[in-house]
Amino acid sequence: MSKPNPQDRFYSKDHEWIKDDGGGTAFIGITDHAQELLTDIVFVELPPIGKKVAAGGTLAVVESVKSVSDVYAPVGCEVIEVNTELENAPELINADAFGTGWIAKVRPDDAAQIKALMSSADYDSLIREEKQ
Amino acid sequence: MKLIFEKSRPGRRAADLPASDVPPVDLNDAIGEKYLRGDLEMPEVAEIDLVRHFTNLSRRNFGVDLGFYPLGSCTMKYNPKVNEDAAALPGFAGLHPAASESFAQGNLELMFSMQRLLSHIFGMAEFTLQPAAGAHGELTGVMMIKKYFESRGEKRGIILIPDTAHGTNPASGALCGFETVTLRSNAEGGVDLEHLESLMSANVAALMLTNPNTLGLFERGIEKVAALVHGKGGLLYGDGANANAFLGKVRPGDLGFDIIQLNLHKTFSTPHGGGGPGSGPVGVCAKLADYLPVPRIAKKGEVYSWSDNYPQSIGRVRSFYGNFAVVVKAYAYIRSLGAEGLRRATEMAVLNANYIKEKLKPHFDLPYDRVCMHECVFSGSRQAAQNGVHTTDIAKRLIDFGFHPPTVYFPLIVEQAMMIEPTETESKETLDAFCDAMIAIALEASQNPQLVKDAPFSTPVARLDEVLAARRPDVTWKKQ
Amino acid sequence: MDYCPHTQEDSEQMQAVIGVKSIDELFDDIPQKYRIKNIPGVPPPLSEHETMELLKSIAARNSMPSMTLTGAGAYAHFIPSVVGHITGRAEFYTAYTPYQAEISQGILQATYEYQTMIAHLTGTEVANASMYDGASAMAEAAILAAKISGRSRILVARSVHPQYRQVLSTYLWANGFTLSEIPYTAQGRIDETELEKALDDSVAAVILQSPNFFGCIEDIRPTALAAHDRGAMLIAGFGDATSMGILEPAGACGADFVVGEGQSFGNPLYYGGPYLGIFAAREKYLRRIPGRIVGATVDKNGKRGFVLTLQTREQHIRREKATSNICSNEALCALAACVYLTALGKNLRELAKLNIYKTQYLKSRLLELPGWNRVFSAPVYNEFALAYPDAKAANARLEEAGMIGAYDLGRDYPELENTLLFCATELISKQDMDRAVEALR
């Protein structure tokens, strides 16, 4: 069973989360449900600082032993920081996808867009549907 | 087992060198000190250490000479020994590739004859033997597709690839700048003709089709497929990975294929050596012959020579002439089997695959239940759902029964796929023993699933931690 | 002779299990009008004895030279007996790719040992399990450099093997990248001034080869610096791989990728193949390089073992986004190299010295003859170019004496008409060389 989806952030249909930290920036990661599907994560290709990504564009790449998945930017944004801990410990995503397993800190082009994404309740039902 | 480096003792040597019969020179003068290397860390072992090390390593390896190897899509048939002796003849093994043609008439004749034989077997106008492996042949074929349309001034940017295709197909397409679009399979495991029709346009350069496909099924709609592709000016590319299914039964050229790449190490029995060498000849229809890689062999009277004079050619894809020794082995194989033998090989390969399919059908899910060609694809879904035993567990358990596992988790459209290709060189007793093992494992899965999940038990190492290997790559040994 | 064990009875029993009356029924999916009953043009079967006689008769139509004075990308070296005996072990020889690690520890460990030796010899940190040959290894490195850098131009020294440049040209065209050539100097080395002029921010990589096609040893460091200064990578090839026994490795001189032909390490000439593409790189590119890679890990009991690793780079997982489409490689040739290098051990340096001594001897003897002149001034390993007013006639004299003569550089370099590239390895005795010199006198 995956961990509950925190209510303090928003979600994309591609299983990313984004959390507005209030200072004009936001953290992005993948959900616990996503890491479960991916199984053991072995490598994360992080974006360069300063990279501008359009909404739905590829922000990072997450690899398991037998699969590769793109992590998409839920909103248009610029990368201002990446979680360098993942370079040596990609397993942080498996252990704590909503916390220490965050992927990038970004400056959204338009912070209001975040609220247009799915709430945790919406995302809960999306996962339920997928499982059926 | 220790690494060869861990067995090293300073001062030991396994191969000696002759004393110099010419005067030595001062290397600082002849080469220059700044260009000389300092350290040279090579293992230092005696010849007996070397032989025992590698012989013991070999005992930790499984080859087709040791047992049944039903690795789907890889055609692991027996590799006749006479072919090895033929390739090792000094005339073949010892000649330098830059030797002038006057030294190499035998080699050129053999390659020329091989091209002709392949043309006859596959119904293609011309062949090149230059590509070093199947995927290399694919790349060569797609390059020719690109060149063909370029020379006609046509801009076509798409290659269609069925969802059952090998990963090499989309990779080859992308390496030539094409966008690859996935073509769906229909309920009976063939090409979804309606989907093909909707995707075909003047922007589609080619359809890359494996026939029989990776489900081991012959494309029943092949005439329609060819008509749809050709109707829009596209080319039909044949991935010949599964050519063992139709030798002497049908010729791809007759079915409308414009290009086909082969794998001599599959269809024509050359040993694969633990991953290679292979050889990937490419055959084309007449209108594509000008685009073949250079150099090509020309025959004038009884004299053979190399020619670069094909201005439309894509150019070279490899140094020299390809994996010549592999071609010699495959040539010997084709000549010893002859037309009759090739046809019988295909018949027996197809008989064996259908026999396994029938015997295992009650015990494993068979997603496409129809007559198969040279291989059959089962699903381990039943075992996964009922017992939590996955295909990988079944594969590992088979090792304990003395068999090499089938190809697993491919094709991608079959869940928990197990792709079994017995080949024609296996006896009924072997097939029965394999089926008995599979049935025993199915029973174990329901009665003692943990046993299957913990397998194998008979190998020098247990299941290995692939996650660790990929997270913290250790790809070279470092001195402690 | 076919190799199908079924008796008529076996076949009938199996048909009964399947529920067909004839084997032909199994082929009913093939449209009837395309079915064939025979393969016209393919002769009838041969017995094993007849097969061998046929192949012997074809091989006999080759003329075997008494010695070979050509290198040019393929080198005649002594191969210790252990190499063939080990690579001929059926457990290695008749295996497919090591997809099932538990029953493939032999080839996996040997490949790990091979990777270790190659990384050390090339002065890099990592190497893959092999590519098809030196030329395709170089082409794949160029494409990778373009993809990593997001740049589209590749510069290649004209002193790189002409066939490698042709393969580069084919691959780069297909991928939509461009290739420009940098001329060589009177030394026989890459022209640094011309390189500087050609280098700009669109260049993904500079490619040179050392020893280069003329046998000359390039000065790699300044070229690496020049490339790196403009944000381009340096791809270094090599001529005869045994030169790595004595020359400073390209990796130590700043190369990002070291690629080339490993045939010299224990693989016969075989008229051009199978050979061994060596691909080595800096560690930072490990997750991007093409081809199979073996990694060490542990089993569930903590015991060391080896697996194919970092497979997400490869076509069977990444499909159209894969680094390369390579699948089969040259594993057995890499095994031969591993056994060869183990057999030689530190004697690889002595072997390289022997090649240099022989080469210097042959060169000095030829220069004693009237009409023969040196062409380039840079130091050489085991190949060197000499000019002679009628190179074709000179080679014809060597051929008449039963030797494969020197490589005619005029074939690939119009400006080097009447220039011959000689090669002398440890296999050629002083007596042989004296004989060649006499034939040319």
Image (spheres, helix red, strand yellow):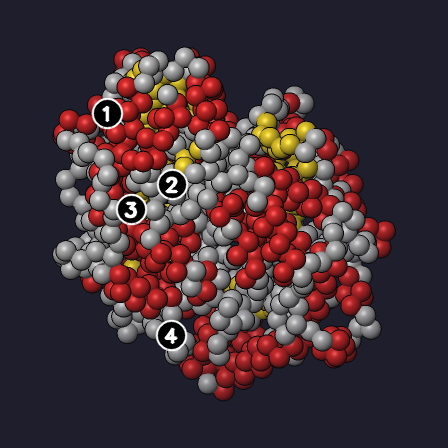
Secondary element at image label 4: loop
- In the rendered image, the residue lying farthest to the right is C33
Q: Where C368 sits versus A32, above or below? A: above
Using the image as rendered, state which of residue B284 and residue C154 is in the foreground.
B284
Could you tell me if the residues under marks 4 and 1 are in contact, i.e. CB atoms within 8 Å?
no
For the residues labelled 4 and 1, the Cα–Cα distance comes to: 52 Å
Secondary element at image label 2: loop
Q: Residue C379: which disc?
A: 1
Give residue A64's position: percent from left, percent from top: 38, 56
**Which quadrant would residue A45 be assigned to in this image?**
top left
Give residue C266's position: percent from left, percent from top: 36, 49
* Residue C82 appears in the figure: yes
Residue at label 3? Answer: C118
Could you tell me if the residues under marks 4 and 3 are in contact, i.e. CB atoms within 8 Å?
no
* Residue C116 appears in the figure: no
Q: Residues within 10 Å of mark 3 (few under 14, many from 20)?
A: many
For the residues labelled 4 and 3, the Cα–Cα distance comes to: 29 Å
For the residues labelled 3 and 2, the Cα–Cα distance comes to: 20 Å
Q: Residue C159: which disc?
A: none
Residue at label 4? Answer: B459
